[in-house]
Image (spheres, grey):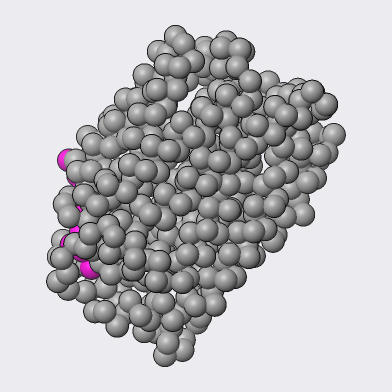
Amino acid sequence: MTAQDRTAVAEAPAHTAASAGFSTGYRHYILVILTAMYVTNYLDRQILNVLLPPIKAEFHVSDAFLGLLAGPTFALFYATLGIPIARLADRSSRRNIIAVSMGLFSLMTVVCGTAAQFWQLLIARVFTGVGEAGTGPSAQAVISDLYPPERRAAAQSFYSAGLNIGLLIAAFAGGWIAQHYGWREAFLAAGAPGLLLAILVMLTVKEPPRGHSEQLSDHMETPDLRTVARFLWSQRSFRWVALGAAMTSFGGYGATAFMPAFLVRSHHLTLEQVGVIFAGIAGIGGWAGTFLSGVVADRLGRQDARWYMYVPICAALLALPFQPVFYLAQSTTVAIVAAIIPAAMGAVFLGPCVTMTQGLVPLRMRATASALFLFILNIIGLGLGPQTVGLLSTLLQPVLGADSLRYALLVGMVSGTAGAVCYWRAAKTLREDLARVARLF
């Protein structure tokens, strides 16, 4: 490792997080609990995508309205409210914020199952987004205080892989329940576990001191939002990290929202069949890619911190040639096989990007930095990705009919390539920006 990288990564002794009541086993327990929270979070978020076909049939709405339901309705509140909640998390108990937020989004998922009108479903999804806004930044900041920098990407990627498990459960169980019992019952089943998990967080999880994993003294006052935003903007690599993540997630969220509907319309599969396929390629394959990316980034990043950006670049380029085959193949078998690599690479960027976001700011900025990162990612990715795909599909439908989704989904290839370019730009100043933070302690 170069002297510059050693300063930037600021390695701590392996026993650091085991002190002060945080044994290795207990910090792993907290990581598992937070990951289970993220599984529930993503289950409640993504089960809607599996249920779009029966919702469309019942309420007689267009793909553009389905895109509104899957994207902006949730994303605007999820991304925007994440910032003030993260400000609170930088000042107070992150554990309590996680538990209360989890209880709210789980309750609102149950309420989605009671909607009698489409507008009622829209409102319930708004409050699901409000609840989920409080979990991500707080959880990512807690993980950074549990694991030292040289192990942090693996821990953040383990947490991030919860989205793939949540996606797996949403696809498999959601498709099966919707097929046999109805889409309302699927919402009810998805929301209930989070209520129990919120109680478990309050009873069994304690919060690590800020800076614990790095043996850093938490001597700073919590800066105001303008100060945090100004500092992040001055970190040139962060601008490109956030924009790259937004571009990657733009295509990813668009594909995830409409992949079940695409398989139903263009390949004439049932919801139950879609659930099994989606669970396998996006759940199991995606989990492996998301988690292993953090392990690889940590290992290579010990020699050169720029590998935290090179890993997402490799993932984007590896997935690129398989995407048109998946969307345009007439054979269902060929399409499913072609989807394996893009699904495995879809969330590879998360662990490394979150790790670098946490490393690019001082301790009392971490939750807010995560919230600002997620704001950019979700406003562009979640807010515009599904909506863009839905609008394109609606515009192409008079010409292409049921196959309009095939071509609308290809927009993800463009945004994924743009994301890779952004990661390359971030890598150019990453080591310099990390070293700047290390000098503040």
Q: Is residue 108 above or below residue 93?
A: above
With 220 as the anchor, is 428 left or right in this view? Answer: right
With 358 as the anchor, is 96 left or right in this view? Answer: left
Point out residue 247 in the picture as x, y percentages from the top left corner.
58, 53
Q: How many marks?
A: 0
With 16 as the anchor, is 159 left or right in this view? Answer: right
Q: Is residue 26 above or below residue 233?
A: above
Q: Quadrant of residue 82?
A: top left
User: Does the stretch in magenta take in 172?
Assistant: no
* Camera-nearest residue between 379 and 134: 379
* Camera-nearest residue between 313 and 164: 313
Q: Residue at x 51, y 41 (%)?
A: 382
Point out residue 337 in the picture as x, y percentages from the top left corner.
75, 43
Q: Is residue 156 above or below residue 234?
A: above
Specify whether residue 266 is in view: no
Q: Residue at x 55, y 49 (%)?
A: 249
Q: Residue at x 48, y 59 (%)?
A: 242
Q: Residue at x 36, y 48 (%)?
A: 136
Q: Quadrant of residue 410?
A: top right
The quadrant the C terminus occupies is: bottom left
With 285 as the anchor, is 26 left or right in this view? Answer: left
Point out residue 378 in the picture as x, y percentages from the top left corner.
47, 46
Q: Quadrant of residue 409?
A: top right
User: What type of secondary structure mainly makes up the magenta span?
Assistant: loop
Point out residue 137 in the picture as x, y percentages from the top left corner.
33, 51
Specify whether residue 226 is in view: yes
Which residue ends up furthest to the bottom in the rendered image? 3
**Residue span colored magenta:** 203-211
